[in-house]
Image (cartoon, rainbow, N blue to C red):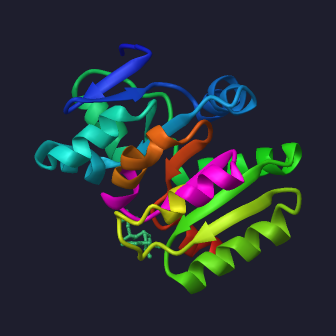
């Protein structure tokens, strides 16, 4: 099958790369260079939504990288005679980034989920990745026009901002705010804080 660097499914262009390579040859250098980066980990629900939700499509297309989160995307690629090398799950990427963050003493910001879940996820990071500095956190039930969170991110300068607001809010929030920031990896992580909180 075809081995292109990108595979397009319903207008969404997926980077065709293994998770380890995505991390080591793309994300880590970009973090070290403080290059602002917006990642979408897209499953079939996300691709479907871009078809009828124009605002959401704009957000997804604005991302720097869309990775294939889900076997459904790999199956859709195959049906188009394309081959995507590997699934890259948002939760797995989050854990890999926390491990790297622990080695490099990175700063992270946790945005999203219920307050109690957000707090537990933050505590989990502090215990399991002790060198990661959680420079800020906020629950995910706020007014999209409230700019206090963006202000806090600008002040605390995290290297990685995990955004757990679910689809479509997480990508829309990143899209609406990313122009104000000078650096940071921004990634929607869905229900990952609920998993971290246990
Ligand atoms: N969430 C949030 N604000 C919202 C809606 C959802 O913070 O306005 C959180 C929710 O508490 C959960 C996460 O987003 O922790 C993912 O939600 P869901 O499972 O509904 O989204 P999906 O993973 O399907 O995108």
Q: Is residue 119 among the parts visible in the rendering?
A: yes
Name the residue: 39% across, 20% down. Answer: 6
Q: Nearer the viewer, residue 137 or 145?
A: 145
Residue 141: x %, y % from top left: 42, 76
What span is in magenta?
151-171
The answer to whether residue 74 is left or right of residue 54 is: right
Quarter holding residue 51: top left
Quarter holding residue 67: top left
The answer to if 154 sits in the magenta stretch is yes
Name the residue: 35% across, 33% down. Answer: 62
Q: Nearer the viewer, residue 101 or 8?
A: 101
Residue 55: x %, y % from top left: 21, 47
Residue 53: x %, y % from top left: 15, 49
The answer to whether residue 74 is left or right of residue 129 is: left
Number of disc labels:
0
Q: Return the residue found at the far left.
A: 52
Name the residue: 61% across, 63% down. Answer: 110
């Amino acid at each position: 099958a075809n081995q292109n660097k990108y595979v397009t499914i319903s207008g969404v262009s997926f980077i065709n790369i293994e998770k380890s390579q995505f991390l080591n040859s793309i994300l880590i250098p970009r973090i070290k260079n403080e290059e602002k980066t917006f990642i979408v980990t897209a499953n079939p629900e996300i691709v479907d939504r871009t078809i009828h939700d124009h605002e959401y499509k704009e957000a997804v297309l604005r991302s720097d990288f869309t990775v294939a989160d889900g076997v459904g995307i790999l199956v859709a690629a195959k049906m188009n005679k394309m081959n995507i090398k590997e699934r890259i799950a948002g939760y797995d990427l989050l854990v890999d980034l926390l491990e790297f963050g622990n080695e490099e003493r990175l700063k992270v910001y946790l945005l999203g989920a219920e307050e109690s879940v957000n707090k537990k996820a933050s505590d989990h990071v502090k215990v399991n990745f002790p060198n990661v500095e959680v420079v800020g956190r906020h629950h995910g039930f706020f007014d999209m026009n409230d700019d206090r969170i963006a202000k806090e991110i600008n002040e605390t300068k995290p290297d990685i901002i995990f955004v757990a607001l679910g689809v479509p809010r997480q990508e829309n929030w990143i899209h609406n705010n990313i122009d104000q920031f000078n650096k940071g990896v921004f990634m929607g992580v869905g229900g990952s804080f609920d998993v971290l909180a246990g």
